Image (cartoon, rainbow, N blue to C red):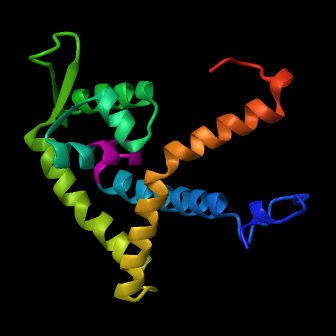
Amino acid sequence: MPRSSQSQKPQHVDLQRYVPAFLTWIANKLSRGASQHYLRVHGVGIETWRLLVLLAVEGSLSAQHASKVIGMDKASVSRCFKSMQADGLIAMSLDDSDGRLRIATLTAQGRKIHDEILGIALERERALLSVLEPQEQDTLIRLLTKLHENLPQVEVATTDYVKRNFKGKLKVNP
């Protein structure tokens, strides 16, 4: 039975069953390990890799769009874009329809580094998923997709909970 439907509130988080902790730990460890390898081979950290991936998929994008898709802070994306541009991985231009919006595209060098790191990334994914049968992998991807799509509802539920339970204690107005 999910913890939220139990009659008694827990006195602490059950770390053996707390899904956000597992997701965070897995993501942190995967990112740290990947970053070490990407830095060693190409001098590219995990944030740069994430943006290279998104650029390879989408072709071009703004910092705002990248921030929205991958959940990085927009200022972090902008700083990363500046670094990537200085390293010759991307070119920046103004959007044709909105002259204030800066758009990033991969350069040939950025594409080359993406393609070389892609093998490392896919090997890491293969090794991670190797403990699961193909059907379990499909189920995992389906469940992760559902969880990802539910994140807006998580924010609504959290906002409502905080408003109900911490009316006089709110420090900052979002």
Res. 157 image quadrant: top right
Q: Residue at x 19, y 59 (%)?
A: 116
Residue projecting furthest to the bottom: 133
Residue 90 shown in magenta? no
Question: Can you say whether 147 is above or below 123 in the image?
Answer: above
Q: Residue at x 42, y 53 (%)?
A: 35
Q: What secondary structure predominates along the stretch shown in magenta?
A: helix
Res. 103 image quadrant: top left
Res. 164 image quadrant: top right
Image spot of residue 40 (x, y percent):
36, 55
Question: Can you say whether 87 is above or below 49 in the image?
Answer: above
In which quadrant is the N terminus drawn?
bottom right
Question: Can you say whether 86 is above or below 43 in the image?
Answer: above
Q: Which residues are magenta?
A: 42-51
Q: Residue at x 30, y 42 (%)?
A: 51
Q: Residue at x 49, y 58 (%)?
A: 147
Viewer-side residue, 47 vs 170? 170
Viewer-side residue, 95 vs 75? 95
Image spot of residue 125 (x, y percent):
36, 71
In the image, taking residue 61 as reference, residue 136 lies left or right, namely right
Residue 49 shown in magenta? yes
In the image, taking residue 31 as reference, residue 164 lies left or right, namely right
Q: How many marks?
A: 0
Image spot of residue 69 (x, y percent):
35, 41
In the image, taking residue 6 as reference, residue 39 lies left or right, namely left
Viewer-side residue, 132 vs 148? 148
